[in-house]
Amino acid sequence: MDYIVNEIGKEFFLIRSPEKELNRNIYLKRFISSDRKERVNMIFDPGTPLDYEALFKILKDLIGGVQNINLIFISHQDPDLTSNLKALLAANQNALILGSIDTFRLVSMYGISEKNFKGVETFKRDIVKISRTGHLIQFVPAYFCHFRGAMMVYDFESKVLFSGDFLAGTNTKKNGDIYATEESFDGISMFHQIYMPSKKALLLTIDRIGLLNPLPEVIAPQHGDVIKGNFIYDFLSRLTKLDVGLDLMSWTQSEKDNLIDAINQFLNSLKNLDKDIYEKLILKLKRVGEFTQIFSFKDDIVEDIKLTPQDSVDYIVRNLYEIENGSPSVSLLVNSLTNHGLIDKLPKFKFERKDIESPLE
């Protein structure tokens, strides 16, 4: 599959990798002066060596070549966005990397010189002018989302907020469009429950976004769908209520054991009812070679889970429907979730039956 290139704001481009499960979103902003005599090109989270060949060709079309990159913003230190840095600096030794000092402390291990880096904390203000073109950008902290030194950038011209891993998500939307729909929040919820440390970190970042003036019209995360319009407020509002990371450890071991027991009973019932669908579901739940495991297995027995109880059940339902969408047998299996203990054994979790039945509508 090819990379997707799309202009999501004025001179602000998405370059999206083709992975089915968890894609990488690289972004490019072309700052062009009003008289069009000056240009500054800024790339955001420039990806990995897996992206370089496609990125090389795309940048040639958009800005005349990778050598014309002037600024490189990195939201945090992970290799899925920093392992291309050496290649970009080889193309333009004068390119400047922008990020937090905490981020550079780790990124410097690639052998990158301090002369190619400026910590965003060293600017006198969080709003910075691109001197050659007159444009304004604002650095917005996203501390502990998911890294201590995580940063976002707001481009005033396009009103696009590049958010890094905040509001990132796995691909749970059925169509291949780049923009978020209601289906996208499942992937955002899953990603945040696994990678974000606490709800408090989310709330602080949400508050900082709310202080931007004007408010962003587009939020562009490093993974998943681009968020715009009413979905910005809607998704941020839902995140204020989402337990993640350490918050999920508040349920007792006996509560978790009850959930794991109920899931294993359901899987055993499924195996007796339809072995073919059972084997396909187990393969999906193990997610071999993809993203991360939501369920930890020993052989075919679930031993641990990383999501909330409700989301764990919803996740099983979604994967059943991906196996054989709309078939009568799958509808029967989904209904059997409520008949094999996942609801009855866990009354204190207050599962909503409408959530379980929604795929049948």
Image (tube, helix red, strand yellow):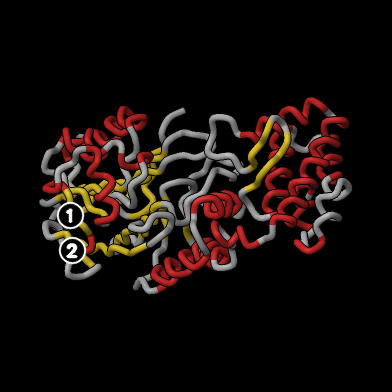
Left or right of 100 on screen, residue 280? right
Q: Which residue is mark 1?
A: 118
Depth check, front residue: 83 or 93: 83
The residue to which callout 2 is attached is: 122
The spot of residue 302 in percent (x, y) is 71, 39
Residue beneath the point at 87% across and 32% down: 273
Looking at numbered disc 2 in the image, what kind of residue is underneath it?
Answer: Thr
Q: Quadrant of residue 46?
A: top left
Residue reaching furthest to the top: 276
Residue at 28% x, 46% y: name it. 106
Residue 85 point in image, percent of width and height: 25, 39
Q: Secondary structure at mark 1?
A: strand
Q: Is residue 173 left or right of residue 355?
A: left
The residue lying at 67 percent from left, 30 percent from top is 283
Q: Nearer the viewer, residue 299 or 281?
A: 299
How far, Cα to Cα, is label 2 from label 1? Answer: 7 Å
Quadrant housing residue 166: bottom left
Give whichever of 11, 132 is nearer the camera: 132
Numbered circle sitting on residue 341: none
The quarter holding residue 155 reads bottom left
Q: Secondary structure at mark 2?
A: helix
Q: Residue placed at 27% from the left, 46% from the top?
A: 43
Q: Locate residue 32, reporting x and y percent.
A: 19, 53
